[in-house]
Amino acid sequence: MHINPGRIRAIRDGEAHGPVIYWMSRDQRVSDNWALLYSLDIARRLNEALAVVFCLTPRFMGATAEDRSYRFMLDGLKELEKRLSGLGIAFILAHGDPGDVIPSLIDDSRAGILVADFSPLRISRTWKSMVAGRTEIPFHEVDAHNIVPCWIASQKQEWSAHTFRLKIRKHLAEFMEEFPDPRPPPRPWRESVDNRWNAPADQDAPSWMIRSGEQAAAAQLERFISEDLDLYASHRNDPTRDVQSGLSPYLHFGQISAQRVALNVMAVGGDHSEFLDELIVRRELADNFCYYNEHYDSMDGMPEWARTTLDDHRGDRRDYIYSHEELECAKTHDDLWNAAQLEMRIRGKMHGYLRMYWAKKILEWSESPEDALRTAIRLNDRYELDGRDPNGYTGCGWSIGGLHDRPFGERPVFGKIRYMSYGGMRRKFDVRKYIDRIFQMADQ
Ligand SMILES: Cc1cc2nc3c(=O)[nH]c(=O)nc-3n(C[C@H](O)[C@H](O)[C@H](O)COP(=O)(O)OP(=O)(O)OC[C@H]3O[C@@H](n4cnc5c(N)ncnc54)[C@H](O)[C@@H]3O)c2cc1C
């Protein structure tokens, strides 16, 4: 099986003897998963068994077992367990901190090699260095999330989509390849596995609720391509039309591969460059930012010009200042903002165009840019199904901290940060229609 070696890097090299463990984290799927394909390839070469391990921590970046995103993830993992078992691959749902759980699983199973998928986020990097420090077997990392592996797309933090686009284009032809089908490993896992699932599935979900899992993700992609793709370029900024793909929760949990999305979109023909630019350039730029900037979720990580201009306007009078709780409960004077906040709370996904407005108003109504960024990230991570993602830190940074953007005309509070107004939104789409729709949803 050919897997481009550029997708893989060794956290620790060495010769492998024994079963293979794929520690799955960010890429929670069977189909189109380079980390799984690579693990299967090693298992075949070693004539060994393979287990996929997922570590369930009681809290993950502020999410608890009661949260919708946690349930969404568990529903997806249950489907994954079935699909893996159909391929003769054991799935172990381990409970606890990966820094403890993975090393003891390696000991118990006498595993010969560990494979992990890639994430640029702090928590994942900390876990990996803990695991590396407590184990001795070879440990490889595969970027199964990005089309062009993050470390190949660019070797430094890029300052704009423009500079990144030029770099990523050079590598796209090489990495935009079809995936082979996963085939069963040569041997079964020795120990039998009986997973403990501690959260019930969401039985009575309303129709607008986003369904979890690889099958739901594939169906959403098919629906988007047949119904909305042709309207994307012209109507994607109209929240009343909702022609966005709706794929971000699936991409976030790795229930669908961005490369699969790109391949299927390109296969239908026509010019879909606007969509592909968001999916490839903007999404992979977010990974680039979080990978190369350790302050990705604070004002310290924002560009110098933006911090300076925001500093200059620190003392400006704010017409409204809202507390975190007032914002969380959608209790502002602005009915559009309240509706967007409600959409996020109820559905777990705010329309993309409103996310910019939403975050910029938080800057306008907070005591300081630092407070604004903290609040936006906290709400985004808590309520968006696609939250806790490089796209979220980058989106909040773009809106509030001028990240990947340029200076605009100077105005109070914002300085030279790009501004968005209620009037501007009204000129773009039927604000009343959107608000009414969200309040109807809230009444259901
Ligand atoms: C303040 C703010 C917060 C955001 N928080 C998140 C978040 O937590 N998680 C998240 O996935 N996206 C986030 N975004 C980016 C974007 O709004 C969402 O990815 C998009 O709205 C998701 O809906 P969709 O899948 O239907 O998008 P589509 O428009 O159909 O786009 C397809 C895919 O392209 C990618 N994409 C689209 N726009 C962007 C963008 N601006 N930056 C990076 N990737 C993009 C996403 O992976 C998306 O799923 C945020 C943007 C802002 C301004």
Image (cartoon, rainbow, N blue to C red):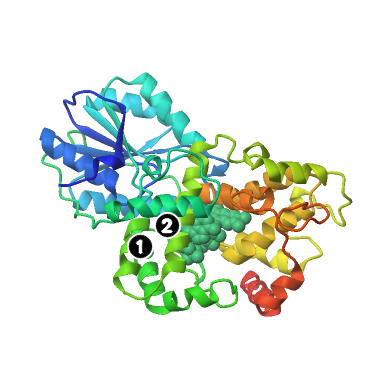
Drawn side of residue 163 relative to residue 405, left or right? left
**Side (left or right) of 227 relative to 49:** right
Q: Whole-percent x and y of residue 244?
A: 50, 69
CB of mark 1 within 8 Å of CB of mark 2?
yes
Q: Is residue 252 above or below residue 143?
A: below
**Percent x, y of residue 123:** 49, 34
Q: Earlier in the sequence, mark 1 or mark 2?
A: 1
**Pointer 1: residues within 10 angstroms few (<14), some, or many (20+)?**
some
Name the residue at 70% across, 72% down: 425
Are there few (<14), some (14-19), or many (20+) residues within 10 Å of tag 2? many
Determine which residue is flagged by label 2.
280
Q: Which amino acid type corresponds to the residue marked 2 in the rendered image?
A: Ile
Q: Quadrant of residue 83?
A: bottom left
Which residue is nearer to you in this view: 64 or 301?
301
Q: Is residue 153 visible?
A: yes
Q: Quick one: SS at disc 2?
A: helix
Q: Quadrant of residue 275?
A: bottom left
Q: Is residue 72 visible?
A: no
Q: Secondary structure at mark 1?
A: helix
Name the residue nearer the viewer: 274 or 232.
274
Report the amino acid beneath label 1: Ala
Comparing 96 with 400, the one in front is: 400
Q: Is residue 289 above or below residue 244?
A: above
Q: How many badges with numbers are in the image?
A: 2
* Residue drawn where x is 16% and y is 37% of the image: 43
Residue 298 appears left or right of 276 = right
Which image quarter holds the C terminus?
Answer: bottom right
Q: What residue is drawn where x is 29% and y is 43%?
A: 35
**Image location of residue 305, percent across then percent down:** 69, 44
Name the residue that disc number 1 marks: 262
